[in-house]
Image (cartoon, helix red, strand yellow):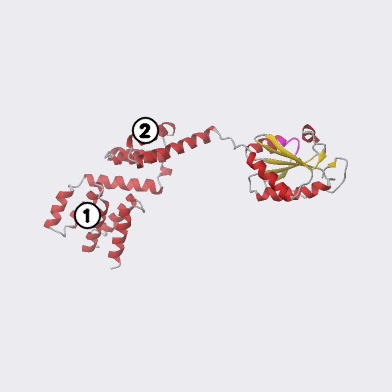
Amino acid sequence: MNIDVSGAASAPTATPPADLIKESSDRSFKADVLDASREAPVLVDFWAPWCGPCRQLTPTLEKVVNEKAGKIRLIKINIDENPSVAGQLGIQSIPAVFAFAGGRPIDAFLGAMPESEVRRFADKVIAQAPAAPTTPEAELEEQISNAIAAADEAASAGDVGRAAQIYGMVLQHQPENAKALIGMARLYLATGDVAQAEATLGMVPEAERKGDDYNSLAASIKLQTEAAELSEAAALEEQLKANPDDHQARFDLAVVLNAEGKREPAAEALVELMRRDRSWNEDGARKKLLELFEAWGAKDPATLRGRRLLSALLFS
């Protein structure tokens, strides 16, 4: 039902205390409606204090907008106090509801409507609204995020050259990007360049030196550095054949086996050392085993097996 602007009735209900719903004016129309509609569609409820149907419609609009939880907003404009915008839109009777999205009007209806129709109208406006524009900064961040994901995928597939190229491109734009630096350092480590891996990881900003990826890589580099200073696995195995209770040789063998990628044998060597002497070197075998777990990651099969072996030993 439409009414002419010469009618009379009581005011609509007050605006609920929420950012999604508020009163506005001719002066604030650009900020509250045009600019805001670039972020989310906006319904503009043109009303007047004497409008009876306005009093019926406004609470329904408020209810529907609150239900949408931020997908759409409601601005209420008293045309008696703010006739300019209403005049520009050619409004001759109220209630009148205009929908704005992307900085322009996209739909409208006149008169009070039942709640189901208001909800259907709101859903239609939300569906028609253009996607919010992104800033150049946001676009760059999205591109970098996608690039790192592609580099990680290439690294997992063993395509070291492609992964390194993508990480390098990211670092040209963001030299302190922690994910790219960690990814590049992991590639250096995988190719045996421990020194370069350590240097690259050292470029990660102090505030970003945390999380499973960083901690795992730092532990792996430490273990590889230790292994480089030890004898070869074959020599250490010969020492153990000659003296099975040479705990230092068994300990060193575990470190070397890990460096060779033989994770489960490394874990088994440390558990065997603990079985022979749990207190050796101030619980050194257990501490080293935990370092291995951190380097491998919690879900690595070697970690899972090592934890089972450790639990069986400790609770036997």
| Residue 297 marker | none
Image height of 160 relative to 308, above or below = above
* Amino acid type indicated by mark 1: Phe
Left or right of residue 95, residue 184 in this image: left
Q: For label 1, count other residues whose C-alpha is less than 10 Å away and answer few (under 14), some (14-19) or many (20+).
A: many
Determine the image quadrant of residue 24: top right
State which region is magenta.
25-29
Can residue 57 be seen here? The reply is yes
Q: Residue 118 in the image: state x and y as whole percent.
A: 72, 47
Q: Nearer the viewer, residue 19 or 282?
A: 19
Mark 1, secondary structure of its residue: helix
Determine the image quadrant of residue 287: bottom left
Tag 2 near tag 1, CB within 8 Å: no
Residue 210 within the segment the image draws in magenta: no
Question: Which residue occupies 72% across, 36% down?
Answer: 29
Residue identified by numbered label 2? 165
Q: Residue 234 in the image: state x and y as whole percent.
A: 15, 49
Q: Nearer the viewer, residue 130 or 217?
A: 130
Q: Which SS does the magenta portion mostly show?
A: loop
Q: For label 2, count other residues whose C-alpha is less than 10 Å away and answer few (under 14), some (14-19) or many (20+).
A: few
Q: Quadrant of the C terminus?
A: bottom left
Distance of mark 2 from mark 1, alpha carbons? Answer: 38 Å
Q: Quadrant of the N terminus?
A: top right
Residue identified by numbered label 1? 251
* Amino acid type indicated by mark 2: Gln
Disc 2 vs disc 1: which is toward the camera? 2
Left or right of residue 290, residue 39 in this image: right
